Image: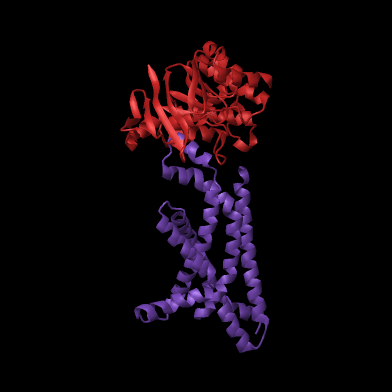
Chain colours: A purple, B red
């Protein structure tokens, strides 16, 4: 089997990996912001609930969480599990898990904005939402880029955990291929794929960081 | 006309009484300076006047409209819509400038008039350029705050406050974060504004400046007004505490 054949065999898996990556990234970045705001909310009960949620999501293995999301509906509610639910379970599990990490990154960024920024905005008559969207968030984004980049690079590698639910992403296919061909080459191809993927991710965040370097 | 009236203001932080029954009036076109040692409550008074802090008791009345009114020993604040309108009557220049670092100088000045006041874009930019010229910063319109000296940043923040066309401008120790040379820059600007009859309330440690530029001076200590009146009255006061305070400054 030539390298080209291996790549051809793995290509559908690469597509699934890329899908898991993008869907997780977008949904957990949005979910994470909401979670961070709940975590920082004045309502003590909500804040504590968010804190507990984050603690559990960060304190237990992602692999276990994926299994819970996949088998949970059947064991808890008796809903039969369909084949097509596999990928959705992976996407839901990843989003729920990564939202917890991003929430803490957002929280750090938001609490780093000096009170003076809020006070200046208040004096100039900005509403609370205007202050958050136009004054606070742009500064938060700049501050949290390095941390988000780190987490995103971890996400690229974590997508391989989807094999737990036998979703046909890159790593699942690679392992099958290695077993079928008794050859290490598919592993090498997979490694190169993840490495190049992360190289692109890192380059993107470098670019973003430079672009936001116009102020300090 | 009274632009601002504060009656019997009381404010405590965790049981510590910071303002004990403070009353003051600001007339149109007047410059009021508030002086006193650190911890005397003068900055808190300013923060209460600008509603960054809530008072416990007393009245705050801008242009005859009550922002807060004493009711049964507690201050009752006006409805949100009224407070929003009253907010538009005044501006504040901070000790640490608090410019928006992600906005250029011109955007710092024009953003609120456009986004909050929904004014005409051409008119706002025209006015902002005129303000920058007055502040001697015409060449800095597209610079970002981090590229400016402290004095320049403070001038931008004065321009930003003025762009909202406030009736009263508050200054909270506007030169405390600046070296003597830059302090002079800012004081000159405030003097020019006074000459234009801008109504201002200035919390300051610059005694000579307070003496020269003010119409009225309030000396505060430990949450009360110890001495007040024209600069001559206050600076020649025979009050023991006032003399001590000025004496220490002169000794330095």
Residue A65 lies left or right of residue B73; in this view the side is right
Residue B160 seen in this snapshot: no
Give the x, y percent position of residue B58: 37, 29
In depth, the one of A66 and B203 nearer the eye is B203
Residue A39 lies left or right of residue A105; in this view the side is left
Picture quadrant where residue B189 is located = top right
Q: Residue at x 60, y 21 (%)?
A: B245
| Residue A106 in the image: above or below residue A117 | below
In depth, the one of B142 and A91 nearer the eye is A91
| Residue A137 in the image: above or below residue B184 | below
Q: Residue at x 63, y 71 (%)?
A: A193
| Residue B227 in the image: above or below residue A21 | above
Picture quadrant where residue B211 is located = top right
Image quarter of the C terminus of chain B:
top right
Give the x, y percent position of residue A159: 55, 72
Image quarter of the N terminus of chain B:
top left
- Name of the residue lying farthest toward the front: B240
In depth, the one of A203 and A115 nearer the eye is A115
Residue B46 seen in this snapshot: yes
Give the x, y percent position of residue A27: 47, 62
């Amino acid at each position: 089997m030539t390298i080209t054949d291996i790549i051809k065999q793995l290509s559908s898996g690469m597509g699934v990996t890329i899908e898991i990556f993008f869907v997780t990234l977008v949904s957990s970045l949005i979910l994470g912001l909401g979670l961070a705001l709940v975590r920082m909310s004045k309502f003590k009960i909500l804040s504590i609930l968010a804190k507990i949620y984050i603690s559990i999501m960060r304190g237990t293995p992602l692999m276990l969480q994926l299994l819970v999301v996949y088998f949970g509906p059947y064991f808890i509610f008796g809903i039969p599990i369909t084949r097509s639910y596999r990928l959705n379970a992976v996407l839901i599990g990843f989003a729920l898990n990564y939202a917890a990490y991003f929430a803490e990154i957002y929280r750090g960024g938001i609490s780093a904005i000096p009170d003076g920024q809020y006070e200046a905005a208040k004096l100039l008559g900005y509403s609370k939402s205007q202050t958050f969207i136009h004054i606070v968030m742009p500064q938060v984004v700049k501050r949290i880029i390095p941390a988000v980049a780190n987490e995103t690079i971890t996400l690229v590698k974590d997508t391989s955990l989807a094999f737990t639910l036998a979703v046909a992403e890159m790593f699942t296919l690679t392992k099958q291929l290695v077993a079928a061909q008794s050859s290490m080459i598919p592993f090498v191809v997979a490694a190169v794929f993840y490495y190049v993927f992360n190289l692109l991710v890192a380059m993107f965040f470098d670019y973003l960081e430079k672009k936001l370097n116009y102020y300090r | 006309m009274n632009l601002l009236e504060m009656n019997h203001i009381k404010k405590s932080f965790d049981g510590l009484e910071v303002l004990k029954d403070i009353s003051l009036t600001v007339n149109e076109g007047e410059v009021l300076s508030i002086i006193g040692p650190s911890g005397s409550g003068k900055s808190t008074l300013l923060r209460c006047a600008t509603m960054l802090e809530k008072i416990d008791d007393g009245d705050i009345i801008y242009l005859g409209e009550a922002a807060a009114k004493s009711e049964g020993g507690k201050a009752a604040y006006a409805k949100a819509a009224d407070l929003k309108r009253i907010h538009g009557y005044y501006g504040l220049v901070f000790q640490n400038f608090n410019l928006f670092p992600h906005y250029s100088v011109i955007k710092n000045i024009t953003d609120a008039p456009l986004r909050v006041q929904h004014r005409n874009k051409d008119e706002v930019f025209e006015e902002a350029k005129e303000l920058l010229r007055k502040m001697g910063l015409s060449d800095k319109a597209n610079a970002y705050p981090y590229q400016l000296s402290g004095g320049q940043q403070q001038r931008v923040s004065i321009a930003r406050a003025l762009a909202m066309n406030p009736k009263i401008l508050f200054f909270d120790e506007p030169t405390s974060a600046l070296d003597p040379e830059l302090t002079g820059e800012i004081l000159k600007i405030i003097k020019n504004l006074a000459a234009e009859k801008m109504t201002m309330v200035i919390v300051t440690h610059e005694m000579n400046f307070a003496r020269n530029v003010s119409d009225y001076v309030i000396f505060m200590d430990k949450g009360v007004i110890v001495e007040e009146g024209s600069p001559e009255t206050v600076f020649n006061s025979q009050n023991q505490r006032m003399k001590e305070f000025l004496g220490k400054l002169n000794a330095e």
